[in-house]
Image: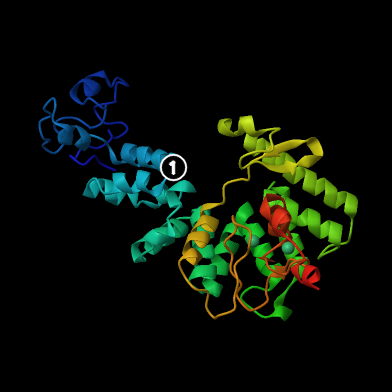
Amino acid sequence: MRTRSGGAYPKPGSDNDATGNNESLKRRNPFGFGSSRTQDPPRKRFRPGDRTEFFEWLHDDLVLSILSKLAVSASSPSDLVNVLITCKRFNGLGMNPLVLSKASKNSLAIRAKNWSGSAHRFLKLCADAGNLEACYTLGMIRFYCLGSRGSGASLMARAAMSSHPPALYSLAVIQFNGSGGSKSDKDLRAGAALCARAALLSHVDALRELGHCLQDGYGVRRSVPDGRRFLLHANARELAAALSHPLSLPLIGSSSGSACPLLSDFGCAIPPLDPHPANRFLIDWFSSRRLEPDGLRLCSHVGCGRPETRRHEFRRCSVCGLVNYCSRACQALDWKLSHKAQCAPLDRWIN
Ligand SMILES: [Zn+2]
Ligand SMILES: [Zn+2]
């Protein structure tokens, strides 16, 4: 591999390193790259203050390494995109599979209002490069938003096979509901097995879902104590996530603001976790679109965004019948967050 200005690493055994001393080489080249003057192609003269020339001395390997670190730490898609559009060279190197495979969850968090063919291609390139977050996010978008059930499920399965917890949990929800198929396609045992794998990886929603499944005997043999243990584990993980966020510390033990008494067993109140970017995309996508065909409903938990794929797919609140949930986990969380105060058996009151 070469620098843009034509330099190359010294070949082992060449005159430059025959003595094992690269000092003369470093003096000629400020970055220590390049071979002897007789072997190098003519280089542009470096002028102090000329930033373009300065960058051209950087070796491709070094630029790739920097871009990879940027991709890992990017907190939004613009962090990465703004660098890639800087110049043709950065764009070419930024699209290297090495960089795309390391793109962080937040750098792939494309907003629904910005969805385009280019965004789709970018996520596809990241997924093809082996980025599990891209596989999961694009899988969710294709399955629920674009209606490509087969390709969406296979992308999520690709991430799940590499033990990606949100992908395992989302496939569990699909199996529990028979999403994308008919009611007879529900596979409770497969759903519980996927949920257990995600729970073993400490995925909070999966821990909560499995806890309720064990308490109800849904897809697994009933065991109330085991179910209780998983629910406590989910609460503990939420508390750990809240404690890792310095702004949430004042909320512990309070009952005001956005805090939720999820840890009522311990007398603590913590804020709900931020939704995954894939869920955020679904929420934004369906907030501005009608669900097709008519009569389909969204999960009522504000942090979920999953829509029904056929009528009456989701479970309803058995008391008021006004809200619908894709899973027991969403129902339990929404109950504590808001529905507990809103739920009322209106028809009984009227009668
Ligand atoms: Zn849901
Ligand atoms: Zn209700």
Q: Residue at x 25, y 41 (%)?
A: 2
Q: Residue at x 52, y 55 (%)?
A: 280
Q: Quadrant of residue 136?
A: bottom right
**Is any part of residue 337 visible from this angle?**
yes
Q: Amino acid at mark 1?
A: Ser
Which element is circle 1 on? Answer: loop
Badge 1 residue CB within 8 Å of ligand 1: no
Considering depth in this image, is 68 or 245 the residue closer to the camera?
245
Please state the horizontal and vertical placement of residue 21, each as a whole percent of the image.
29, 19
Q: Is residue 179 left or right of residue 319?
A: left
Label 1 crowd bin: few (<14), some (14–19), many (20+), radius 10 Å: some
Considering depth in this image, is 218 or 59 the residue closer to the camera?
218
The residue singled out by tag 1 in the image is 75
Please state the horizontal and vertical placement of residue 116, each as a whole percent of the image.
36, 64
Q: Is residue 316 left or right of residue 159?
A: right
Considering depth in this image, is 231 or 107 the residue closer to the camera?
231
Please state the horizontal and vertical placement of residue 160, each as a whole percent of the image.
62, 58
Q: Is residue 168 above or below residue 3?
A: below
Q: Quadrant of the C terminus?
A: bottom right
* Residue reaching furthest to the front: 350
Please state the horizontal and vertical placement of residue 339, each as a whole percent of the image.
69, 56
Q: Is residue 205 left or right of residue 222?
A: left
Q: Is residue 284 above or below residue 52?
A: below
Displayed-image quarter of ligand 2? bottom right
Q: Residue at x 43, y 62 (%)?
A: 124
Q: Residue at x 81, y 70 (%)?
A: 348
